[in-house]
Image (cartoon, helix red, strand yellow):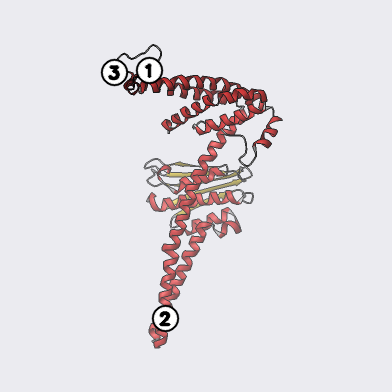
Amino acid sequence: MPHFHSGRRVLTEIIAGAVFPVILASVVVLPISAIAVAEADRRRALFCGAPSMPLRPPGQSWRSWIRLRLGDWALWRTDLPVFLTALVLCALSLIVSFFGLISTSVLVFNPVLWAFGIEAVVGPFKPMSLQQAWVAVPVGLLLGVVTAAVLTAISLLRDASLKAFLTASEQDLIAKLDKLRSSRASLTEAFEAERQRIERDLHDGAQQELMAVVLRLGMLEAAALTREETSLSRQATSAREQAEHALERLRQTVRDIHPRELSDFGLKVAVEELAARSPLRIEFTATGEDSLLSSPTAAAIYFSISEALTNITKHAEVDQAWIELRCGGAGVWARVRDEGKGGVDIAAGSGLAGLRERMRSIGGDLEINSPVGGGTEVTASAPCEPTW
């Protein structure tokens, strides 16, 4: 949140002003101090919400990391300029914090100081009456706001200088890290939703069916004890049918987790089987060889197609769909389309949102074109091997 980050910026600048003497004294141990200060500044920027990336690995000690950094040319290209900039800005933060905060406190508490007979003088201002002391309060509050604004500006200036000294490769790495964090959060939500779906399917489907089988078997046992042959035959038939139904529900749940056909025969056969089980009339065309596809890629494409067909069945109000699949050495491309009512919004909680993050996690993407009244096209593409 912006105001929260502003508070962090003011706090870190006050701390920076307080540690200025320490940083100034650390000049005698350059370049070690430059490495430590630059790393601390990267962590400060991250704490304040700026795009930054600390370079020291979490499990590595400061001593070993500084020793490694001393042999890197980035020390002179990045760390030393950041250190010199931090030295100047810390001195500025010290001056602004000291005079700004003290003056703000004196002005705001001027009526209290006047009541104790203390003449609180701030620059040219010297209260001559209690009324003048009370006038100083809003002036002090305004000065506090100005002080906070100046400290925030100094913090932003630190961010700008830190970014200016980064190399192009480091900036690209930070951008990739931000994208990775966003994808990880989306994938976590998608996996949790999938876990809940599996739990719900097992609880409401196979578990209930198996419970009914248990009850039928109990009735079958009672009929056997009383030698009621007609009832015995009827209960046995009902128990067998419910057991078969429960088995089919379990198979469907397992297939939704990972279809056996995908592992045994590849993506094209698995999609053909998926199309055959669908209640829709599906025209399926496939070209190329799918043997080069890795398991994560094939699974991501399969479940994207499966989710698209599920959405058509539930929402498109049509009974026909088209699937196109192209496989090759460069990767795989799949498209599912229908001529339904359209208007699909991937941001509205569709299962395709999680699948899009899954596709992106392996270096692919998933796109949806769904104008209202114009049908829906779901297009998924990915390289043969994930870009991990």
Secondary structure under tag 2 reads helix
Q: Quickly name the residue at label 3.
A: 130
Crowd tier of the residue under label 3, counting other residues whose Cα lies within 10 Å: few below 14, some 14–19, many 20 or above: some
Q: Is residue 71 left or right of residue 2?
A: right
Q: Quadrant of the C terminus?
A: top right
Crowd tier of the residue under label 1, counting other residues whose Cα lies within 10 Å: few below 14, some 14–19, many 20 or above: some
Q: Is residue 379 visible?
A: no
Secondary structure under tag 1 reads loop
Q: Residue furthest front?
A: 117
Q: Is residue 87 visible?
A: yes
Q: Earlier in the sequence, mark 3 or mark 2?
A: 3
Q: Residue furthest right?
A: 71
Q: Is residue 341 left or right of residue 334?
A: left
Secondary structure under tag 3 reads helix
Badge 2 amino acid: Leu
Depth order, front residue of 168/287? 168
Residue 71 in the image: x percent, y percent?
A: 71, 30
Q: Earlier in the sequence, mark 1 or mark 3?
A: 1
Badge 1 amino acid: Ala
Crowd tier of the residue under label 2, counting other residues whose Cα lies within 10 Å: few below 14, some 14–19, many 20 or above: many
- As drawn, 58 above or below 262: above
Q: Residue at x 36, y 17 (%)?
A: 119
Q: Quickly name the residue at label 2.
A: 220
Disc 3 and disc 2: Cα gap in Å?
97 Å
Q: Quickly name the residue at label 1.
A: 120
Q: Quadrant of residue 42?
A: top right
Residue 184 in the image: x percent, y percent?
A: 52, 43
